[in-house]
Image: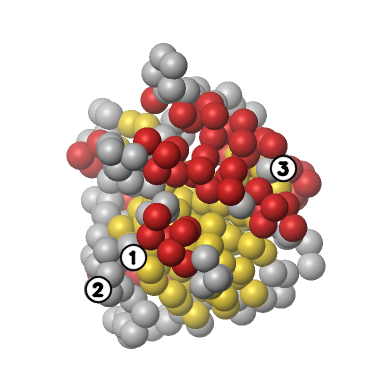
Amino acid sequence: MRIISWNCNKSFRTKVKLISQLQPDIAVIQECEDINNRVFEDEIQPNHKFHYSTGGIGKIGIGLLSYTDYKFKVDNSDLEEVYLNLDLGIKCVAEGPAPVQLLGLWTGPHPDNDSIHYVHSVSTFLKKYSNWIKQNNTIILGDFNSNLTYDVKNRKSHEIMLNLMDEAGLCSAYHTFFREDQGKETRPTFYFHKKNESTQHIDHIFIPKTLAGHIKNIEIGTYDAWGTHSDHVPFILDIDYPR
């Protein structure tokens, strides 16, 4: 299974070929325009796609695409809580040869409500939906806008999130595969103002610990290849997902 997370920095319709040529089973695209009814100017069309934005129809949000046999069944049972109150992302099931529960996210600022301010919203989700996460294989991925180096005294928001991921049975695919410590990543995913001089690692994919040994490869896009397209580079995970 190939999974890709990428903040495309808007105008995904002009960049879709960069993703389609990689043939992902699941692609989670942040800062994506509404693609629900769009036919791309591309010889390769996704077999299934879904877009959601808390800002309403036509607004920038999160796009889900599959170029294989996966389809996204969105859980609308708690739409208001997950999408509107948390302003977080898309909770769904990717149905296909080997179904997987999925939370594609893009955290944002809410300075007046600490429980949903950037990575705090992930922790709020993990606390509320721990039973959902544990009931089946779950992958949580996207632009977290967070790194352990962001933590400040008495808040430790990223560390709290990591502990909750651990309690939910999830681990960071990147840190497991490359055996790097949190906050000491050598492969950045974000280039501030698209400049190579200011780099951060703020895009993550969390997978079940039971699948950690199934990771075949992880590729973090390079600045030279992707820097003109977005301030983020894609996170590409290839995993031998059990059927």
Q: Is residue 169 above or below residue 154?
A: below
Residue pointed to by mark 3 = 169
Q: Nearer the viewer, residue 214 or 223?
A: 214
- Going from the N terminus, do you reach mark 1 or mark 2 first? 1
Does residue 213 appear anywhere in the picture? yes
Label 3 environment density (alpha carbons within 10 Å; few <14, some 14–19, many ≥20) = some
Are the residues at dot 1 and dot 2 in contact (C-beta closer than 8 Å)?
Answer: yes
Name the amino acid type tagged 2: Gly
Q: Is residue 200 above or below residue 15?
A: above
**Separation of disc 1 and disc 2 at Cα?**
8 Å
Q: Residue furthest left?
A: 193
> Disc 1 and disc 3: Cα gap in Å?
28 Å
Question: Quick one: SS at disc 2?
Answer: loop
According to the picture, the residue beneath numbered tag 2 turns out to be: 58
Task: In the rendered structure, find residue 215 and report the number of the disc placed on it.
Answer: none
On screen, residue 71 versus residue 11, left or right, reads right
Name the amino acid, label 1. Answer: Ser
Q: Closer to the camera, 126 or 214?
A: 126
Classify mark 2: residues with Cα within 10 Å, few (<14), some (14-19) or many (20+).
some
Q: Is residue 114 above or below residue 181?
A: below
Q: Is residue 160 left or right of residue 89?
A: right
Q: Position of residue 32 (x, y in %)?
A: 32, 64
Disc 1 marks which residue?
A: 53
Q: Amino acid at mark 3?
A: Gly
Q: Residues within 10 Å of mark 1 (few under 14, many from 20)?
A: many
Point out residue 189 in the picture as x, y percentages from the top left corner: 40, 40
Residue found at x 53% / y 26%: 159
Q: Residue at x 40, y 55 (%)?
A: 85
Q: Quadrant of the C terminus?
A: bottom right
Residue found at the far top of this picture? 153
